[in-house]
Amino acid sequence: MNLSKVKLVVSDMDGTLLNSKHEVSPLFFELFSKLKQQNIHFCAASGRQYNSIVSKFEAIINEIFVISENGGLAKHKDELLVLNVLSADKIIKIITALRLVEGANIVLCGKDTALIESTDQEFINLFQEYYNDYKIVDDLIDFASKDDFLKIAIYHFESSEKFIYPVIKDLGNDLLIKISGTNWLDISDKKANKGNALREVQQILNVTKEETMVFGDYHNDIEMLQEADFSFAMKNAHKDIKEIANYTTESNDNFGVERIIEQLVKSKN
């Protein structure tokens, strides 16, 4: 594996770069300084809200690219690179269908703020890890046409794949439905995926697929893994991701991303 040609490192967050405590390791920040010295760019790509990603990378946020809401939004510093919104009629259609799913906690993800109806404190405590800015409203449908909404995220306490996906999988060909974690499922516009957003970043940086390294663990990472020759599935990844990625690495709790970045840094030396 010749890593010396890599110019861009892209990593998913939850289950990938973040450990089980939702932390970025001090080792990553040390390695980022070395990447910077070697003119290697870094991009964080997550289903999280943009502000939530910022909170994890405050010290270096102006030096990295950020893909948030599964490709619904991408930014570098204050420059907006990608914005893919859901139309109001699609939002109404999706929420109407989701209300038939028992145990579905619905999040309407805006460009700056997320909206929820739930007042279940257990859900809110979990939800706040991924969405720093949010409001509790009476009816999400009332807001469908009042802002730019990038995604609808749904949390199920037991399993998104088992209880949510079967009910909404046939919603339409113009929507992208992604199981993004054990408990999360995301619905967005068809073109709003991490792969399309990554292509925009690659174009800006004049970086090819052969010069790109990507790490992921779940279905919302599929498209961006396909945009890199150096695609890595985490040891803790969903089995489908291990089949798609060209390589594997250790788990998120065993510094899987950092171990490969260390190899990358050494290859440049």
Image (spheres, helix red, strand yellow):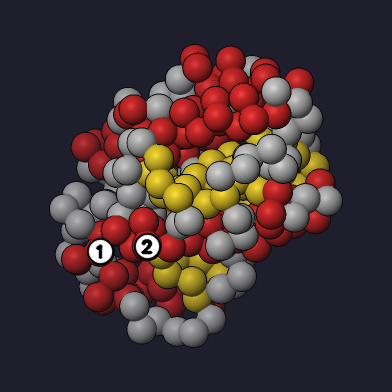
Marker count (numbered): 2
Q: Residue furthest front?
A: 1
Amino acid type at image mark 1: Glu
Q: Is residue 94 above or below residue 113?
A: below
Q: Is residue 121 visible?
A: yes
Q: Residues within 10 Å of mark 2 (few under 14, many from 20)?
A: few
Front-lying residue, 260 or 72: 260
Q: Is residue 197 visible?
A: no
**Mark 1 and mark 2: span between their CA atoms?**
18 Å
Disc 1 or 2, which lies upstream in sequence? 1
- Whether residue 105 sits left or right of residue 36 in the image: it is left
Residue 136 occupies quadrant: top left
Residue 209 occupies quadrant: bottom right
Amino acid type at image mark 2: Glu
Q: Is residue 230 above or below residue 262?
A: below
Front-lying residue, 236 or 92: 236
- Whether residue 97 sits left or right of residue 53 in the image: it is left
Specify the quadrant that holds the C terminus.
top right
Front-lying residue, 17 or 115: 17
Q: Position of residue 152 (x, y in %)?
A: 45, 60
Q: Residue at x 51, y 66 (%)?
A: 188
- Whether residue 40 sits left or right of residue 217 in the image: it is right
Q: Position of residue 240 (x, y in %)?
A: 34, 63
Which residue bears the numbered disc 2? Answer: 243
Which residue bears the numbered disc 1? Answer: 161
Q: Residue at x 40, y 40 (%)?
A: 249
Q: Is residue 115 above or below residue 18?
A: below
Q: Residue at x 69, y 42 (%)?
A: 6
Q: Position of residue 140 (x, y in %)?
A: 43, 60
Question: At numbered mark 2, what does the secondary structure look like: helix, strand or loop?
Answer: helix
